[in-house]
């Protein structure tokens, strides 16, 4: 009987490439797995880390419930096709356990095509529309905040490409070249702005 002791925490980063490049999402998952052998434990850990990193990295840009179902049921080989690089740090193992910090990078373009092929609504770019960055907006006053944000963007000649609207949340895209100007204008208009994961986040 297999026992899995998993402590998975994903740190996401979005890396932008050159013109018309898709996004890359990097995550690190600390894992600690016990099984019948260390080799089996390592295989379980790699699969679990891959699923966790893909799910957590793509969650801000897709229907979370549908994404979770898809990641859970997808074959390991299918998910492996979304990973462009991986590394292992702090690896330790005994006869029956395996622990490490596993880092993987998800190809946003491949993920967009995979999600679309499986009918999962998403707001990722496949790279064909030029270099755009997502802006995740929390609207306290849905109508008033959105109208004010549009006025601000028009005043700076920045196009807002709406990708999703749901409740008090909205996702838009802006040209990467307008990032600095957009951030400065948003802060001057009273918005809080963060970009810890590469995407911009706005709220009041």
Image: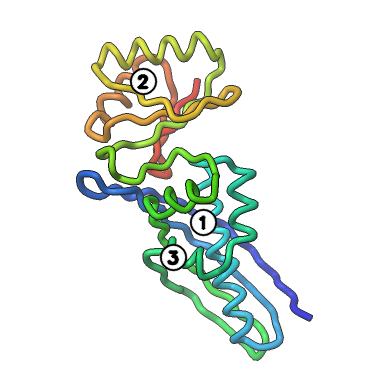
The answer to whether 202 appears left or right of 118 in the picture is left
Q: Residue at x 25, y 16 (%)?
A: 156
Q: How is the image coloured?
A: rainbow
Pointer 1 residue: 54
Find disc 3 in the rendering and name its residue. 81
Going from N to C along the chain, the mark reached first, 2 or 1, is: 1
Whether label 2 touches label 1, CB < 8 Å: no
**Observer-nearest of 86 and 127:** 127
Q: Is residue 25 above or below residue 159?
A: below
Instruction: Say the numbered circle drawn on residue 93.
Output: none
Mark nearest the camera among 2 and 3 is 3
Quick one: SS at disc 2?
Answer: helix
**Closer to the camera, 173 or 28?**
173
Kindly identify which residue carries mark 2.
Answer: 186
Q: Could you say which is closer to the camera, residue 171 or residue 149? A: 171
Q: Position of residue 127 (x, y in %)?
A: 30, 45
């Amino acid at each position: 009987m297999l026992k899995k002791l998993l402590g998975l925490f994903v740190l996401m980063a979005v890396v932008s490439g050159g013109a018309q490049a898709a996004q890359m999402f990097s995550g690190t998952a600390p894992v600690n797995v016990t099984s019948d052998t260390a080799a089996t434990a390592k295989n379980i850990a790699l699969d679990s880390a891959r699923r966790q990193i893909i799910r957590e990295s793509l969650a801000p840009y897709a229907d979370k419930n549908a994404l979770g179902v898809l990641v859970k049921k997808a074959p390991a080989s299918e998910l492996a096709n979304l990973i462009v690089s991986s590394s292992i740090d702090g690896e330790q193992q005994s006869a029956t356990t395996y622990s490490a910090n596993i880092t993987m990078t998800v190809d946003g373009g491949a993920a967009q095509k995979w999600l679309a092929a499986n009918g999962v609504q998403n707001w990722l770019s496949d790279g064909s529309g030029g270099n755009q960055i997502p802006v995740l907006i929390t609207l306290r006053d849905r109508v008033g905040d959105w109208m004010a944000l549009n006025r601000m963007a028009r005043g700076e000649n920045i196009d807002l490409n709406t990708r999703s609207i749901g409740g008090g949340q909205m996702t838009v895209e802006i040209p990467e070249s307008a990032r600095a100007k957009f951030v400065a204008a948003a802060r001057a208009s009273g918005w809080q702005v963060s970009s810890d994961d590469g995407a911009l986040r706005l709220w009041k």
